[in-house]
Image (cartoon, rainbow, N blue to C red):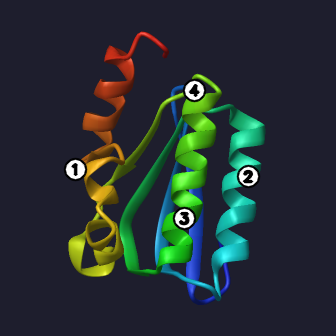
Amino acid sequence: MSDNGLLSLRSTMAGTIVVVHIDGILDATTRDQFADRLDTEAEDHGPDMILDLGGVTFMDSRALGLIVHHWQRSTTAGGNFALVAVQYPSSKVMWVTGLSQRLPLFDTLDEALAAFAADPQS
């Protein structure tokens, strides 16, 4: 777990899939902490990754860019990537940019895991 007062990151495993639970602000002040954690988790656990954004209180375009980077990194490596519990009020940038229509969004962790299980790449 890492916590700087603005952002708290915690990881769990769902089988072989890392789930990063994010609470707080995703912006320029927390970008490095967020980037380092995602890099570490990808290196330690492989390309399958789920980000639980249910605790995010604000997300800016830089954080969204980082999420897109990891989505592309994961899928390029043959993995699965998903975002769960995304809340519109704190993540409006996804809708403003149109990425909410492209990124793999799921309401719950169970829904994301079911989609991973149905994907022949898994």
Report, in whole angstroms, how far the alpha carbon at label 2 lies from the one at label 3: 14 Å
On the image, the x and y values in percent for residue 104 come to: 34, 43
Q: Earlier in the sequence, mark 4 or mark 3?
A: 4
In the rendered image, is residue 44 in sight? yes
* Rendered position, 31 above or below 117: below
Q: Nearer the viewer, mark 1 or mark 3?
A: 3
On the image, the x and y values in percent for residue 82 come to: 41, 43
Q: Earlier in the sequence, mark 2 or mark 3?
A: 2
On the image, the x and y values in percent for residue 108 come to: 25, 46
Report, in whole angstroms, how far the alpha carbon at label 1 lies from the one at label 3: 21 Å
| CB contact under 8 Å: marks 1 and 4 | no
Q: Which residue is mark 3?
A: 65
Report, in whole angstroms, how far the alpha carbon at label 1 lies from the one at label 4: 20 Å
Q: Few, some or many C-alpha atoms within 10 Å of disc 3 (few <14, some 14-19, many ≥20)?
A: few
Q: Few, some or many C-alpha atoms within 10 Å of disc 2 (few <14, some 14-19, many ≥20)?
A: few
Residue 16 bears which disc, if any? Answer: 4
Q: Which residue is mark 1?
A: 107
Residue at image x 59%, y 62%?
66
On the image, the x and y values in percent for residue 5 come to: 61, 89
Q: Which residue is mark 2?
A: 39
- Identify the element where label 3 is drawn: helix
Q: Amino acid at mark 4?
A: Thr
- Identify the element where label 2 is drawn: helix
Q: Quadrant of residue 87?
A: bottom left
Q: Few, some or many C-alpha atoms within 10 Å of disc 1 (few <14, some 14-19, many ≥20)?
A: some
Q: Amino acid at mark 1?
A: Asp
Q: Check the image and name the residue furthest to the front.
A: 97
Q: Quadrant of residue 31?
A: bottom right
Q: Earlier in the sequence, mark 1 or mark 3?
A: 3
The reply, left or right, for residue 111 in relation to residue 122 is left
In the rendered image, is residue 1 in sight? no
